[in-house]
Image (spheres, rainbow, N blue to C red):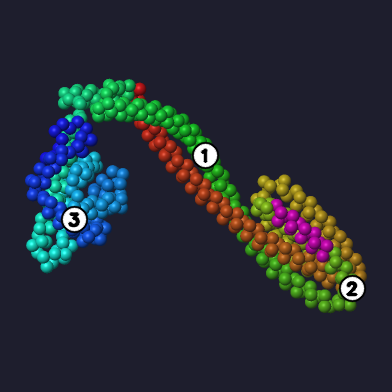
Amino acid sequence: MGAHPEISTHDDLLRLDPEAIERAKRFVDFTAKDAELLAGLRPVVEPHAAAIVDAFYGRIVQFPHLTRLIGEAGSNVERLKRTQVDYLVQLFSGDYGLDYFIRRRKIGLIHNRVGLGPGWYLGGYSLYRQLVMPLLVEHFAKKPKKMLRAIAALDKLLALDAEQAITSYIDSVMLDLGALSVSKEEIERQVTDYGRVIEAVAAGDLSQRVAAEGEDDMSRLGRSLNDMIGSLAVMTGGIAGAVEAILASVDAVKNAVADQSSGAAEQAAAVNETTSTLSEIRATSNQTAEKASGLGTSAERTREAGERGLRMVEENIAGMQSIRAKVEVIAETILSLSRQTQQIGEITGVVAGLAQHSKMLALNASIEAAKAGDSGRGFAVVAAEVKDLAEQSEESTSQVQKILTEIQHATDRAVMATEEGTKGVDQGVELMGRTGEVVRDLQGVIQQSVLASQQIVAAVRQEAVGVDQVATAMGEINQVTGQFVAATKRTSEANEELSRLAARLGEMVQRFKS
């Protein structure tokens, strides 16, 4: 009702016949008195227009697809609120001529463009009526008959609005349908051609293309399909190249993993062998510690006996000072040997140094014990036992003889210092000849034995701590090596799986030809 008889464009939908508009008004019995009555209500409604629109869109946002349509149309709720305030005020403007009806027809066109069906905006008219009604009831509380006429006038105008919006919506839809220039047979033919090309592509032939030369929707779809097939061909070629690169990388990783596995196995074997050797050295070191502890106890008792003898020759103390000075030279030389032994850094070197050191000390102690005669026989037995233990340690460290060369030189210097000390002792013996030569010789042996035993005990303890530290470190290395071997095995398995997957991917890509 009220549409132009010849419609070819959307602009034609807005060209209205004034006579048709008047017929529409007469059909719903919308009169000049109705217009006058609604215009008189504008001061009542306009102050509440913003609140009414807020309540209206409060209902709209409860339906997600409506807010989505608003966003897809390039608008937003706040912008539409301002437009709706104008629309609501126009309902009570009193001017319902050609411009008013054109604006209402635009509503239908817009709703068709954004995809909003008539049912939703018919509901919108009803919602506006519900929101305006309380204002009318309050305003005409004491004039019920006039209130009924006002409500009837509003209903007539809303009906006219709805009629114009629905008419333009339907005419717009029909115009869109009439714009379809492709026949049903042509569509079926194109769909068949497209289906044949798609089947060929699915079978692996990426050289197929569809004929798409028009500007209709099917032609645009065909061009999109051609673009998709072209992109699939490019992607397939890229995948094939990637598969070759993956296979080459897998081979390189496989070789690297094989080398790592071989090296890790050799390292594990070497670590196990070293651990076994350290266990043997630890056992020997424990025995040496026990014997050295006994030697220290014996030396302590001998020292106590010597002190008692010294108290008997206090008048010759001045001569013994020279002997003590020589002995201190020996002590400094032996301490130098100990510092050199600590610098070697390797536990086997420490053991070798201690063995040589102990051997020389034992030899020196035997010499001094021999000089002491029967008084030094017990100490000679202990010295012989220490010598045996030193020889055992020397045999265990024969593989590091080069490192012991420097220690041997230090030992030689210690022997020379000992010889000088012996000369000093001899001079002391001459000075103490009248007060007891035997006691003086015994005191010299006692001093050397105490110092040697203390050094032996300290060195053996240090050796034991070092061996324990190395054993612990080797255990940790062994554990890490085992973890590395296991990880290498897992890497090899993962690499094999990656190789299989790459091969399968290559077989799948080979199905397609460009």
Query: What x and y, as percent, mark residue 293?
Result: 66, 66
Q: Secondary structure at mark 2?
A: helix
When asked about the image quadrant of residue 187, the answer is top left
Q: Which mark is residue 352?
A: none
* Left-right relation of 26 to 101: left
Specify start and end residues of the magenta stretch as a single range: 328-344
Question: From the image, which quarter does the C terminus lie in?
Answer: top left
What residue does disc 2 label? Answer: 318
Residue 162 relative to residue 472: left or right = left
Q: Nearer the viewer, residue 511 or 478?
A: 511
Report how far apart the C-alphas of labels 1 and 2 lie in the structure. Answer: 73 Å
Q: Residue at x 67, y 66 (%)?
A: 294
The secondary element bearing badge 3 is classed as: helix
| C-alpha gap between disc 1 and disc 3 | 94 Å
Left or right of 434, for residue 501: left
Amino acid type, label 1: Gln
Image location (x, y in percent) of residue 313? 86, 76
Q: Earlier in the sequence, mark 1 or mark 3?
A: 3
User: Crowding near pointer 1: few (<14 within 10 Å), some, many (20+)?
Assistant: some
Circle 1 residue? 260
Name the amino acid, label 3.
Ala
Residue 164 showing in the rendered view: yes
Which residue position is annotated with label 3? 39
Q: Residues within 10 Å of mark 2 (few under 14, many from 20)?
A: few
Mark 1 or mark 2, which has the lower sequence index?
1
Camera-side residue: 227 or 502? 227
